[in-house]
Amino acid sequence: MILEFVNPLNMDKRMGKFTEITCRSLQLGDRVRRGPDWNSGNQDNYMAGTVVGQISDGKVIVEWDHGEQNSNVQCDESNTYSLRKVDEPKVLVDEMTAVGCRVVRGNDWRFGNTDGGPGSLGTVLDVRQEGKIVVRWDSKRTALYKMGFNGKFEIKVHDAAVRSQNTEPRSAYNSAHTTYSESENESHRPNSRSARPNCTQEPADYVIPIYSDSIVSAIWEYQEGSEWKKYPNDINVKIEKAYQRKKTGKTIIEMDRTTYQIYFSRMIQENPSNKKEQSVRRTD
């Protein structure tokens, strides 16, 4: 019990979660899709996933973007690669964050340079109901942080990473439309991980970026006293993109060094730290 209090991830790590991967072709936190040796049916639902641990040498745990976790063979010794790494960001809909998101230290960060230093990036490996998340930093340190717990935001989503990876539409990889040849299989081995197969692009597969510098016509405002004030343009774009994806959902913004949550169904902006609410409105 004392060990669990000191390190709340001990139990998870004993089950294989959040442990570094021994296979050379993947690392903990990598985004993946089915690879050349895939034989697991439709467990991925043709979606991308995130490597969140390893059960044993050659068997990694993946959490697919639809929420389920499965183990898959990724073994150098047998030259079996069920997965392949992809450069495909996790796109949020109405969540503050999700497994696979890239994050940086937030306004309430208090852990020195344990993340690798200012500007260091990490990947979310687990999101817990009480407002805490597990992050694996690129420096290979994994720890539990607050993101909404008691109004504290030690971590925040890295908007710049999402923008830079969504400058052009990306298509989802649908193996039903792709046939591997023997040479294509070899191109996906660890010694040539940068190679990517051709895939059929369908409009429905395109990732729609929420965080974007594009221009939107709608104007979002928040009420301060008797006045309505416009959000800065970049924040206005973020709010509108999130609203377009789910008009009954919510989004998270940072303004004047304060984190807020906006609930579209109630049209309010809430400060999680003090629970103060302000009305918001949208005009075309």
Image (spheres, rainbow, N blue to C red):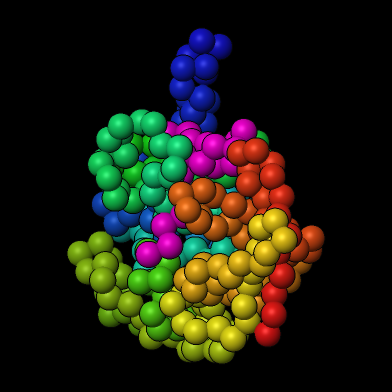
Residue in the foreground of this view, choosing between 69 and 94: 94
Against 196, is 75 above or below? above
Q: Position of residue 174 (x, y in %)?
A: 52, 79
**Could you tell whether 120 is left or right of 191 in the image?**
right
Q: In which quadrant will I find the N terminus?
A: top right
Give the magenta range: 143-160
Residue farthest toward the front in the current orientation of the protein: 226
Q: Position of residue 10 (x, y in %)?
A: 48, 24
Q: Is residue 268 visible?
A: yes
Residue 146, magenta (yes or no) = yes
Q: Quadrant of residue 246?
A: bottom right
Residue farthest toward the left in the current orientation of the protein: 191
Residue in the foreground of this view, choosing between 210 and 257: 257
**Could you tell whether 191 is left or right of 90 in the image?**
left
Which residue is rendered at x = 47% and y = 71% of the image? 234
Which residue is rendered at x = 61% and y = 39% of the image? 273
Against 133, is 158 above or below? below
Which residue is rendered at x = 62% and y = 60% of the image? 251
Q: Is residue 263 visible?
A: no
Q: Position of residue 51 (x, y in %)?
A: 44, 52
